[in-house]
Every structure is written in structure tokens, then in C-alpha cells.
Image (cartoon, helix red, strand yellow):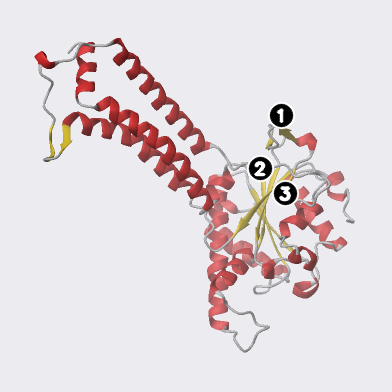
Amino acid sequence: MRLKDFLAELRHRGVLKVATVYLGGAVVVLEAGTHLLHNFEAPHWVLKVFTLALIAGLPLACLMSWGFEFGPGGVHPAAPMRAESAPASRRSDAVFTVVLLLIFAAVTAVALRQWRTPVVVVETPAAAKPTGVVSPAADTGTAAGSGAVVPNAAAARVVIIMDTYAPRGVYESETREKGGTNADDLNDLLRDLPVSILKETIGATWEREDQLLAQHPALILVHRSGFFHSMNQEFGFSYPDDPQHFDETKFRRLYEVADNKLAAALGYIGRSSPGTKFIVYSRGTGGDWAEEAGRVAWVKGLEGRFPFLKGRVATINVPGGPSGGSFGDPETSRLFREQVSKQLGLGAEARSKGGAQ
């Protein structure tokens, strides 16, 4: 079949019209779907499947249009175009086909770019209390006019703080009253270290490991009870200080589930990113965390489950316990700065600088 005959057949069977309508609709659906999936914090693989389905749907729609006709009598095989009724070939058919192919290629390229693009990080003014990012000028690159901070090649030391939005898990009363999280205070505490600090709020349905991995983190700081406080808030369980409604069996069971969720997250991230290290901190709740032997046992249990994490997980017991532990305490500041600097190999000067904040 000659090309001009093939193009005429495409027009006769309505394939070009179907392709046009499909591509236009796919652009709208992809844009709306991306925003909806992001707002509902869907796992990243859902967007990948959604994108692939839209791309694969175009040839399927064209094949259906080629082989079948939809009319008042229902669906039936499309009859080939008769030679005597063939419309005169038009140069516009070829141009239109090329344009459709270019549009399809552009849509595919945009979809693949969205597939691979990491979470956008917004710059935080130095004078303001940070809520997500601290980016020292020497270690980050800023896209001109975009306001977005993107770690450059020299800023490989990206610290991600996985924390909870649940008020019960926020240490500082002032931060809690303002609706902040521990990440806000840790950002202040680590502000002058030569690192880029990103914030990831976790919860009962958190499944953003792939987005987190897209940041290529060298270190992840996570609150040991972060998942627990978030899950406890969402499920509405009471704490021990409310004995009238406290159910210890459910409480302990939920803590075990949350601790398992934390271990699974560290295991997945650790396997996918062999260079990432971890620091797990707590004020001493959850078993014998306040004792070094207890923390050592916890890490050994984690390494037994995920051997590839051996030597990559450090712990911090925040001085002062559940009632007095504070990020404003000089000893707490020293512990965090020293451990972060040690894990990232920043050297003694970075460890001690600003340690008495």
C-alpha cells in the first residue's frame, strides 16, 4: 500500500481524529492525575503505572479505530475503503500525521520527565524559621529566578529529617504551639553545617520512599517514635497519662507495628541506596532506649533483619528524658552535631562549631 493510500485509509477509518482526541484528553488527564496523586500522597509507582497506561492507550485506541466502527447498530468490523470512493489524497494528511507523532513524542517525554523528577525543594530565607530546607550557599545551587534549591555536585551531603506532625511527638512546646515539628528545631541546630537539610513528614500511610531516594540522601535523621505518634493520633489511642481510657495492650501492639514500619522503611531505603546512613533519636521512650545496652540491642535487631545496614545506623538518646529532653539543651546540640558530622565525615571543626546553641 502506498503512503498516500495508507493516509487516506487512516482518514476514512477516523484514526487521525481518534488520535487527536486521545492525545488532547491524555494531556488533561495526566496533568490532573499527577496533582491528585500527589495531593493524596499516593506511592510513586502509582504515577508510573498511570503514565504508562496513558502512553500505551494511544496505539490501542488507534487499532480499535482502524478495525472497528461504532454506529447506531453497535460495534462491527470496519469496512475497507473502496477505490472508487477514495477521497483525493491531500498533502495535509501527511503533515497532520507528522504533527500527531511529534505531539505523542512530546507527551511521552513530559510524562517520563515527571516520572523521574524528584520532589521540588523550596528555598527558606535565612532570617526565617525553617520549615523544610536549610541550604548553605557553598553547598547548593539555585536556579536563577526559580526560587528552587537543588543540591549541586558538591552538595552530596544531604540530610533528610523524617519527623512526625503529631503534637505528642514534638519536643519543644513553643514549636508545638506554632504547629511546627522537630525538623524545625533540628534545622536550627544544624543550620551552619555544610549540608543541605530537607524535611519529610511521616505518618500512618507514609509510602514516599522513592521520592525520598530521588534526593540521594547521604544521611537520614528519624525520630524513633515518629511513626508511632502519627499512627496513634490517627487511630485515636490514649496515652498512659490518661488511665481512664488507656488500653495498654493496644498501645504496646501499636508501638510494635510502628517500630516494624520504621525498620521496614530503613531497610528499603538502605537496600536501594547503599551509601545512605541513618541516625535514630528518641528521648528514652519505647523500651530501654535510655540505656546504651538497649539501643545497641535495637540496632543489632535491625541489622539482623537487614544485614546490609550493619555499621550504617547510629542512635541518639536525647538527654533529659520524656519530660525534660530539649533541642535547646547544649548537651543535646553537641550530641546531634557530633553524630551528624561523624556520619558525614565532616571533621572535628564542623562538629564543634556552634555547638553551644
Residue type, mark 3 in image: Gln
State the image coordinates of residue 279 (x, y, percent, origin top left).
Answer: 69, 56
Depth check: 181 or 70 in front? 70
User: Which comes before the other along the chain, label 1 or label 2?
Assistant: 2
Q: Which residue is mark 2?
A: 121
Q: Is residue 338 visible?
A: no
Residue at the (38%, 38%) spot, across then down: 52
Quadrant housing the N terminus: top left
Q: Which residue is mark 1?
A: 144
**Circle 1: element type:** loop
Q: Which mark is residue 74?
A: none
State the image coordinates of residue 105 (x, y, percent, origin top left).
Answer: 41, 25
Q: Which residue is mark 3?
A: 343
Depth check: 300 or 343 in front? 343
Quadrant housing the C terminus: bottom right
* 3 or 1: mark nearer the eye: 1
**Cα separation between marks 3 and 1:** 32 Å
Residue type, mark 1 in image: Ala
* In this view, 208 is above or below 142: below
**Cα separation between marks 1 and 2:** 14 Å
